[in-house]
Amino acid sequence: MLLRQSALTTSILFLLFVSCGESPKKEKDKVEENIANMDTVPKIEVDSTAVKEEEKPFKLTEENAIDFFFDYSKTLKKDKVKITTTMGSFTVQLYDDVPYHKANFIYLARQHYFDSTQFHRVVKDFIIQGGNSDDRKTARKRGKIGRYLLPPDAKKGHKHHRGTISMPSSERDNPHKLASPYEFFIVVTDPGSYHLDGSYTPFGRVVEGMDVVDAINNVPVGDGDWPWQNIYILKAEVL
């Protein structure tokens, strides 16, 4: 019995000696070997500035907007936009000879900017105005697309007839009547609101769904001509 215990004790001590003495040495050898191998791998230098420039998202500014829309207008083969609202849909056809405003409207539609904005100003027998909202999401969209204005283009002979879509001026200090690109208004006055000619830029007209425009113009409004019940633009599609 004692011999068995002695043999068992000797075996355990031998195993402990092996496990505590050999394994760390082997692991150390492997680590040193790996480090040696790593030193032989060539280092690749990355230009961090180039990476940052590549990842930087494009934004429109007052410095680049005109050049951008000039080039963008040359690529356009479509000139209609269907606007679907919570009260129905209507379609506008955009004028080819007002290229910056046409290109701007189509660009924003394709960026889904108008989706979820509202008709925030309704003046009975005068206009409906859309493209803004009290939702923070709209402000975030504007921030992502960029901050810019468009020059007026009111000398092409287009007048503010009934059904004309036009662009309001910015509310910023704006002696040159630069247009606020994110908003638009549609004339409902019959036959038109010609006192606006020369001050604002007509860039298209409603060719289908004027009854929906009239219905929006007849909703009850509160202070600031904002409708009591929000009228949302659900979608703007380039046709």
Image (cartoon, rainbow, N blue to C red):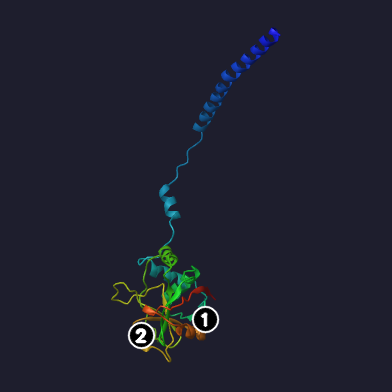
Q: Which residue is mark 2?
A: 196
Q: Position of residue 198 (x, y in %)?
A: 34, 84
Does 127 appear above or below 106? below
Pick the front one: 214 or 194: 214
Mark 2, secondary structure of its residue: helix
Quarter where residue 148 is shown: bottom left
Q: Which residue is mark 1?
A: 90
Mark 1, secondary structure of its residue: strand
Pick the front one: 80 or 12: 12
Marks 1 and 2: which is nearer the front? 1
The disc at residue 208 is: none
Outermost residue toward the top in this view: 3
Amino acid type assigned to the residue bearing label 2 in the image: Leu
Q: Position of residue 189 (x, y in %)?
A: 42, 89
Q: Position of residue 44 (x, y in %)?
A: 47, 41
Q: Residue at x 61, y 14 (%)?
A: 13
Tell which circle, 1 or 2, labels the residue nearer the N-terminal end: 1
